[in-house]
Amino acid sequence: MKKKINFLIVASDFYTEITNGLLEGATSQIKDLGHSYKIFKVRGSLEIPTMVSIKLSKKKYDVVVVVGCIIKGKTDHYEFIASAITNSLLSISIDKKIPITNSILMCSSLKQARERSSSKVNRAKEAVLAALSVIEK
């Protein structure tokens, strides 16, 4: 019998439609594989690493999947936020020795985000499988 994996999912709810699509992909994949999960939501993507850090300090999770969406605007703000999130999550992952997969979509438009959070192509579903590929080694 395979070990049941306990997933922490932290989701930015700024783009609710996109987040809901990503969450559907992640949770359906986790359930299909017979694992468990707990979801925590934050308002924006920049708050995700802080919530991950807080939740990991309070409870044991085997893997973390983060979901959200950042749409490129007219300034460089998008790149700074994306870089800060990525670096923070990597640091937490290494420090806690736990896989954290990042399915925060970083897109040029809502159309692109919708395509990547749909039932056909769902980056969060892929993130679940990526996390398992690390923990099951």
Image: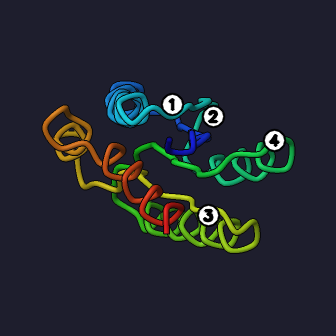
Looking at the image, tell me whether mark 1 or mark 2 is earlier in sequence order: 1
How far separated are the C-alphas under marks 1 and 4?
A: 22 Å
Label 2 SS: strand
Query: What's the residue at 21%, 37% (across, down)?
Result: 114
How far separated are the C-alphas under marks 1 and 2?
A: 6 Å
Relative to 57, 84 lies left or right: left
Badge 3: how crowded within 10 Å, few (<14), some, or many (20+)?
A: many
Q: Quadrant of residue 9?
A: top right
Q: Nearer the viewer, mark 1 or mark 4?
A: 4
Q: Nearer the viewer, residue 117 or 44?
A: 117
CB within 8 Å, label 3 to label 2 = no
Looking at the image, tell me whether mark 3 or mark 2 is earlier in sequence order: 2
Q: Nearer the viewer, mark 4 or mark 2?
A: 4
How far separated are the C-alphas under marks 4 and 2?
A: 18 Å
Q: Nearer the viewer, residue 58 or 35?
A: 35
Residue beneath label 1, please?
13
CB within 8 Å, label 1 to label 2 = yes
Residue beneath label 4, please?
59
Q: Residue furthest left?
A: 120
Residue beneath label 3, please?
89
How far separated are the C-alphas under marks 3 and 4?
A: 17 Å
Relative to 59, 21 lies left or right: left
User: Label for residue 42?
Assistant: 2
Give coordinates of residue 88: x percent, y percent. 65, 67
User: Label for residue 64?
Assistant: none
How far separated are the C-alphas under marks 1 and 3?
A: 18 Å
Looking at the image, tell me whether mark 1 or mark 4 is earlier in sequence order: 1
Q: Quadrant of residue 26?
A: top left
Label 1 SS: loop
